[in-house]
């Protein structure tokens, strides 16, 4: 019997959220403040204990300066760079 190491959507979002937050050198508190979400909720998302609704996914993506798809893709080909001011 074949076994597939399938990663749940919660785990994909968790991994991507944590990685993007760290790449941008943001604390969970900073993301919580930007998104008006609680630090404990951000922590639960990063641990895969919660899956955010689409509206929250959009808010998180905006706070991190990435398209929402970057939080959902299993292994994005390349990460979006933070958007700078022009």
Image (cartoon, rainbow, N blue to C red):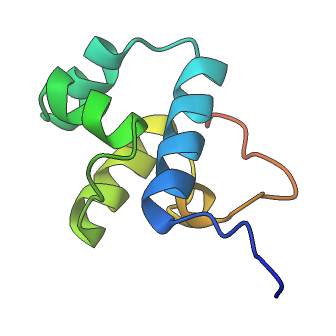
Foreground: 71 or 67?
Answer: 71
| Outermost bottom residue | 1
**Quadrant the C terminus occupies:** top right
Within the image, what quadrant is residue 29 found in? Answer: top left
Relative to residue 54, is residue 77 depicted above or below? above
Numbered circles on residues, count: 0
Relative to residue 39, is residue 41 depicted above or below? below
| Outermost right residue | 77
Q: Identify the residue at image location x=72%, y=37%.
A: 81
Q: Identify the residue at image location x=59%, y=19%.
A: 22
**Quadrant the N terminus occupies:** bottom right
Q: Position of residue 72 (x, y in %)?
A: 55, 64
Q: Identify the residue at image location x=23%, y=26%.
A: 32
| Outermost front residue | 1
Relative to residue 5, is residue 45 depicted above or below? above
Q: Position of residue 80 (x, y in %)?
A: 72, 46
Q: Identify the residue at image location x=57%, y=42%.
A: 15
Foreground: 83 or 16?
Answer: 16
Q: Is residue 61 visible?
A: yes
Horizontal side of residue 78 vs 26, given as left or right: right
């Amino acid at each position: 019997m074949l076994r597939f190491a399938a990663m749940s959507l919660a785990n994909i979002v968790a991994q991507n959220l944590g990685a993007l937050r760290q790449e941008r050198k943001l604390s969970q508190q900073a993301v919580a403040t930007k998104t008006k979400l609680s630090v404990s909720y951000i922590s639960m998302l990063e641990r895969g204990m919660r899956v955010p609704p689409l509206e929250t996914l959009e808010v998180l993506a905006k706070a991190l300066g990435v398209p929402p798809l970057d939080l959902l893709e299993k292994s994005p080909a390349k990460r979006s760079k933070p958007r700078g001011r022009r």
